[in-house]
Image (cartoon, rainbow, N blue to C red):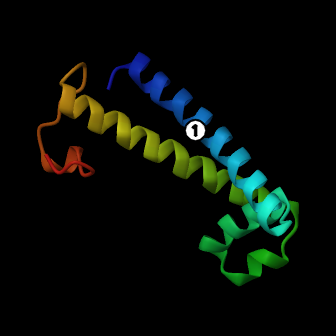
């Protein structure tokens, strides 16, 4: 993956993460009255277990970090899948390079 493609995928992942974080926070507040910190403590609980719900802003920050890692990772995966299918700038030679589409 060349540098400009890498930067495009990274920037797209950050944008996806921001928009998804806003959507999740607004949705959780509108439906259940849960604060954004509560949303990201829930994300952190995937790695830390139920004790994450008792944490403060540090745990919520860790959940936000996990959220962005996941969003950026999925974005990179979709970029790879797209370029495997289209064949521009990035080529797959094995199944392990394109697990999402199984080429």
**In which quadrant of the rendered view does residue 35 lie?**
bottom right
Furthest toward the front, the residue is: 31
- Which residue is at a point 36% across and 34% down the rendered structure image? 79
The quadrant the C terminus occupies is top left
Residue 84, position as x, y percentages in the image: 21, 33
Residue 86, position as x, y percentages in the image: 20, 26
Residue sitting nearer the eye, 32 or 13:
32
Residue sitting nearer the eye, 30 or 60:
30
Q: Is residue 101 left or right of residue 11?
A: left
Q: Is residue 80 left or right of residue 66?
A: left
**In which quadrant of the rendered view does residue 16 lie?**
top right
**In which quadrant of the rendered view does residue 11 lie?**
top right
The residue to which callout 1 is attached is: 16
- Which residue is at a point 44% across and 46% down the rendered structure image? 74
- Which residue is at a point 76% across and 61% down the rendered structure image? 28
Furthest toward the bottom, the residue is: 50
Residue 77, position as x, y percentages in the image: 36, 43
Graded by Cα atoms within 10 Å as few (under 14), some (14 to 19) or many (20 or more), the crowding at tag 1 reads: some
User: How many numbered circles does the render carry?
Assistant: 1
């Amino acid at each position: 993956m060349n540098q400009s493609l890498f930067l495009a995928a990274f920037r797209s992942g950050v944008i996806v993460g921001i928009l998804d974080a806003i959507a999740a926070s607004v949705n959780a507040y509108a439906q259940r009255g849960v604060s954004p910190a509560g949303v990201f403590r829930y994300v952190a609980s995937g790695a830390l277990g139920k004790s994450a719900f008792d944490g403060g802003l540090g745990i919520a920050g860790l959940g936000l970090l996990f959220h962005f890692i996941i969003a950026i990772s999925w974005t990179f995966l979709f970029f790879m899948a797209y370029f495997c299918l289209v064949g521009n700038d990035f080529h797959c030679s094995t199944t392990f390079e394109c697990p999402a589409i199984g080429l």
